């Protein structure tokens, strides 16, 4: 979690200089993205990979968890091959929908299912040992932090799995929300919550030594169906949620949470998110913006009432963005049923930069393009997507603001200025704290580094 008093934190942590919008050098990690050669990794280790996936009821307690060409194994292999830092899933916990049991899993049961899915172990639901799990296919990959939403339509739940821990970022004493608080009818918000299955949020503590800010992730499975009432439910939920993001997390342009007192939240948030912390949302939003002929949930959630206006979901109140992901091997945009795009990732593009977004479908693969986990699966690897779900996942890599060690602030006052220059010159020709490049001598290279860092560290 990033501290609000940066200077006091900087003294404790070695004085960090925050460079908003700067990116960690791509040269620090070898290029990995080359699907035509079976390389699906991140270009840069500091990029944050977010994956959204409607898994069609298959992540549940009564699912067959043995290795075979089945839905459980297919999901595990695909997650292991894509290696998201944040995985958001919809339609989880529905045993009846999976055809193997009854009722929706409890929060505790589904949390245990997620642990089994990731790590394997003894199955308390069916007995025996889980035979297929994510770490079986990549032992180095993990998503140890799990948030199962309490919101349910009586059939399934939303779930967020994270590489990094959850933490309270806005001072309300909570790191997760099962659904947005009730929003009063105001402005463009019709009033209400995040819809039939809730719109869950998790506040995530990114490591301070790498990132200048933290991260908020939202996840939703909006109302399905094509009737007029279904459309209205989806769009009203989206309107309430975008109002919540703009006013509660980002202050609605006023610099304080909920400036219009329209959000029924207790306890109240004490502060808005810092300038380097983006909100990234995703899920099955159940409407294709390219073919609906109207302003659907993806547009509402990212642009609010006026496209191109100053009421948007971004931190600066401009429009946020939503993905235009394609299958990189076929060019298909369909995430459901071949051509329909129902699954989206949206982000605050003044804070986070999308490096790329894509749809993953093993049916598009061959022996050259398949990631190693798919290629090594004992069975027909190209059939895994069809076995896993009727939806294809959307994955996006994001570059966030990076924290850079401000070693040139020699006196620790949060600014590189004449005092630091005087200290450097006093140590000229010898080793010491002003040896910024650690070559054993304070010299012209250190002077150049100090001048390049000139100014306020925070």
Image: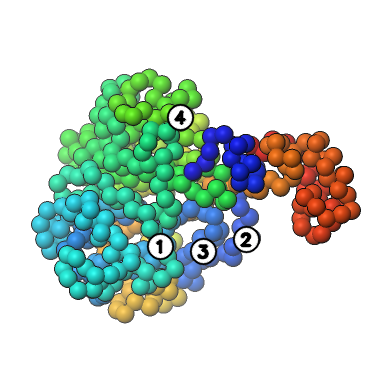
Q: Residue 419: image x %, image y %?
A: 80, 36
Q: Between marks 3 and 4, how big is the CA–CA gap?
A: 38 Å
**Among the two numbered marks 3 and 1 on one chain, the one whose residue lies closer to the N terminus:** 3
Q: Nearer the viewer, mark 3 or mark 4?
A: 4
Displayed quadrant of residue 306: top left
The kind of secondary structure element at disc 1 is loop
Displayed quadrant of residue 71: bottom left
Q: Between marks 1 and 4, how big is the CA–CA gap?
A: 31 Å
Q: Which residue is mark 3?
A: 33
The kind of secondary structure element at disc 2 is helix
Q: Between marks 4 and 2, how big is the CA–CA gap?
A: 35 Å
**Among the two numbered marks 3 and 4 on one chain, the one whose residue lies closer to the N terminus:** 3
- Residue 28 circle label: 2
Displayed quadrant of residue 56: bottom left
Relative to 201, say whether 317 is above or below. above
Q: Residue 168: image x %, image y %?
A: 41, 40
Query: How many circles with numbers are drawn on the protein?
Result: 4
| Residue at image coords 51%, 35% | 274
Q: Nearer the viewer, mark 3 or mark 1?
A: 1
Q: Nearer the viewer, mark 3 or mark 2?
A: 2
**Among the two numbered marks 4 and 2 on one chain, the one whose residue lies closer to the N terminus:** 2
Is the residue marked by circle 4 packed among few (<14), some (14-19), or many (20+) residues within 10 Å? some
Q: Which residue is mark 1?
A: 142
**Among the two numbered marks 3 and 2 on one chain, the one whose residue lies closer to the N terminus:** 2
The kind of secondary structure element at disc 4 is loop
Query: Considering depth in this image, is 44 or 404 the residue closer to the camera?
Result: 404
| Residue at image coords 23%, 44% | 150
């Amino acid at each position: 979690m990033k501290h609000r008093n940066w200077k006091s934190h900087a003294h404790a942590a070695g004085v960090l200089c925050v460079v908003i919008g700067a990116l960690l050098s791509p040269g620090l990690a070898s290029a990995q993205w080359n699907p035509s050669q079976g390389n699906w990794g991140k270009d840069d280790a500091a990029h944050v990979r977010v994956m959204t996936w409607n898994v069609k009821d298959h992540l549940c307690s009564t699912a067959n968890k043995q290795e075979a060409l089945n839905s459980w194994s297919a999901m595990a292999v695909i997650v292991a091959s894509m290696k998201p830092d944040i995985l958001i899933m919809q339609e989880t916990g529905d045993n009846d929908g999976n055809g193997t049991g009854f009722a929706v899993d409890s929060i505790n049961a589904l949390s245990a299912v997620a642990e089994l899915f990731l790590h394997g172990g003894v199955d308390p639901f069916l007995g025996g040992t889980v035979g297929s799990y994510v770490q079986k296919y990549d032992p180095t990959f993990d998503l140890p932090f799990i948030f199962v939403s309490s919101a349910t339509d009586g059939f399934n739940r939303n779930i967020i799995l994270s590489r990094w821990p959850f933490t309270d970022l806005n001072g309300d004493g909570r790191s997760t929300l099962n659904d947005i608080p009730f929003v009063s009818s105001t402005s463009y918000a019709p009033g209400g919550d995040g819809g039939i299955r809730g719109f869950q949020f998790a506040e995530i503590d990114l490591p301070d030594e790498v990132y200048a800010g933290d991260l908020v992730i939202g996840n939703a499975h909006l109302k399905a169906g094509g009737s007029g009432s279904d459309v209205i439910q989806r769009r009203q939920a989206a309107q309430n949620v975008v109002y919540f993001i703009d006013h509660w997390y980002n202050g609605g342009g006023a610099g304080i949470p909920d400036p219009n007192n329209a959000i029924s939240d207790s306890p109240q948030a004490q502060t808005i998110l810092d300038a380097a912390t983006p909100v990234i949302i995703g899920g099955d939003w159940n409407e294709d913006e390219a073919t609906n002929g109207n302003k659907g949930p993806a547009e509402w959630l990212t642009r609010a009432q006026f496209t191109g206006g100053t009421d948007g979901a971004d931190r600066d109140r401009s429009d946020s963005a939503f993905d235009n992901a394609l299958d990189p091997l076929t060019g298909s945009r369909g995430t459901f049923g071949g051509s329909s795009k129902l699954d989206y990732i949206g982000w605050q593009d003044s804070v986070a930069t999308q490096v790329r977004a894509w749809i993953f479908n093993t049916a598009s693969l061959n022996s050259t393009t398949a990631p190693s986990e798919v290629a090594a699966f004992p069975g027909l690897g190209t059939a895994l997507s069809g076995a896993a779900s009727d939806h294809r996942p959307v994955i996006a890599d994001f570059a966030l603001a990076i924290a850079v060690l401000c070693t040139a602030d020699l006196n620790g006052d949060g600014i590189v200025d004449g005092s630091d220059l005087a200290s450097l010159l006093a140590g000229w020709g010898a080793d010491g704290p002003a040896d910024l490049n650690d070559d054993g001598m304070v010299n012209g290279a250190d002077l150049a580094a100090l001048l390049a860092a000139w100014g306020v560290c925070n």
